Image: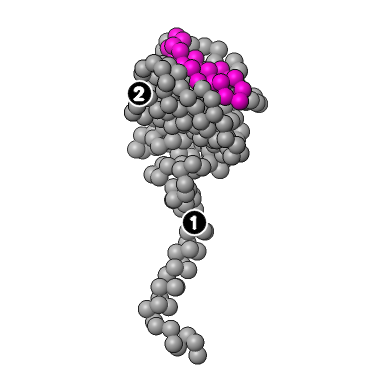
């Protein structure tokens, strides 16, 4: 009896809402990206970020354009991060990546390694501000970090730092960036002192930390989903190059 009293248009609206909710909760990878993009930027990727998972063909060189190599790269989603697995003529290695817009930074290590390693991916904003995401090797969530330059110009200088770990713990302090070879030493002084090594490319920078066994890579993501970037580590001050194309 009650249903007969409900206007037909209202019933249709409720039916469409229920169908939309069901479709949203049960979607595939594309729907997962849409869901993440609608959440708050404090804990999820920014709107418009694409799913970069898949199988890619890799070509690269060591620093100085030496020792060319090629092989395969497998990228898989792991929560809000990605796992990277390389199998190339240089050997095998693994990584954990964080994406921000059209860039991705990867904390890398030899297969079986990576403990204590991590990487921070910064967007460099006008006015000497940094807006970054930090991921630890093997983690499925990333933390957030912001910096505001208090001394210096370009990327070099001193910054006040505030952030939140992937577990939701806030922290604050300072950071100092100094030139070192082709890259930059990046020293945090927050609740603990951490020294990393950074590469700076235009409006983007990536910082590896965790020790000399920790490597990193910074890529641009093309419209076709290909990757083009540079790689290095804390024990060297030069960078190699790498491209990865969809198969």
The image shows residue 158 at horizontal and vertical percentages of 45, 18
x 41%, y 23%: residue: 149
Total marks in image = 2
Marks 1 and 2, how far apart in space? Answer: 36 Å
Q: Residue at x 55, y 35 (%)?
A: 164
Mark 1 against mark 2, which lies toward the viewer?
Answer: 2
Residue 181 vertical placement versus 107 (above, below):
above
Rendering quarter of residue 214: top right
Mark 1 sits on what residue? 27
Viewer-side residue, 109 vs 210: 210
Give the mark nearer the N terminus: 1 vs 2: 1
The percent position of residue 231, horizontal first and vertical second, equals: 47, 20
Q: Residue at x 48, y 11 (%)?
A: 237
Q: Is residue 230 visible?
A: no
Work out whether residue 189 can be spotted: yes
Please state which of residues 133 and 90 is positioned toward the viewer in this rendering: 133
Q: Residue at x 48, y 63 (%)?
A: 21
Disc 1 is placed on an element classified as loop
Q: How would you classify the magenta stretch by its main secondary structure?
A: strand
Read off the magenta span: 175-196
* Image x and y of residue 176, in percent: 48, 17
**Left of 221 or right of it: where is 192?**
right
The answer to whether residue 193 is magenta is yes
Magenta-span inclusion, residue 146: no
Q: Quarter holding the C terminus?
A: top left
Near-viewer residue (212 or 30):
212
Task: Report which residue position mark 2 lands on.
Answer: 202
- Mark 2 element type: loop
- Mark sitting on residue 216: none
Dot 2: few (<14), some (14–19), or many (≥20) neighbours within 10 Å?
A: few
């Amino acid at each position: 009896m009650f249903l007969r009293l409900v206007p037909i248009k209202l019933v249709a609206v409720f039916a469409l809402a229920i169908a939309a909710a069901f479709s949203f909760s049960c979607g595939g990878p594309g729907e997962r990206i849409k869901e993440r993009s609608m959440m708050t930027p404090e804990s999820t990727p920014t709107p418009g970020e694409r799913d970069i998972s898949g199988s890619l063909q890799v070509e690269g060189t060591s620093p100085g354009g030496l020792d060319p190599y090629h092989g395969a790269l497998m990228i898989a989603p792991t929560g809000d991060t990605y796992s990277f697995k390389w199998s190339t003529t240089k050997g095998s290695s693994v990584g954990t990546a964080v994406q921000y817009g059209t860039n991705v930074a990867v904390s890398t290590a030899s297969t079986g390694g990576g403990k204590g390693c991590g990487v921070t991916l910064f967007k460099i904003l006008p006015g000497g501000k940094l807006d970054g995401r930090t991921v630890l090797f093997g983690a499925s969530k990333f933390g957030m970090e912001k910096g505001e330059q208090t001394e210096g110009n370009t990327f070099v200088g001193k910054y006040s730092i505030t952030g939140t770990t992937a577990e939701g713990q806030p922290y604050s302090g300072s950071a100092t960036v100094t030139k070192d070879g082709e890259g930059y030493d990046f020293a945090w002084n927050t609740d603990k002192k951490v020294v990393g090594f950074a590469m700076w490319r235009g409006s983007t920078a990536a910082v590896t930390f965790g020790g000399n066994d920790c490597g990193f890579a910074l890529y641009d993501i093309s419209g076709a989903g290909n990757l083009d970037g540079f790689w290095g580590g804390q024990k060297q001050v030069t960078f190699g190059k790498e491209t990865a194309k969809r198969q």
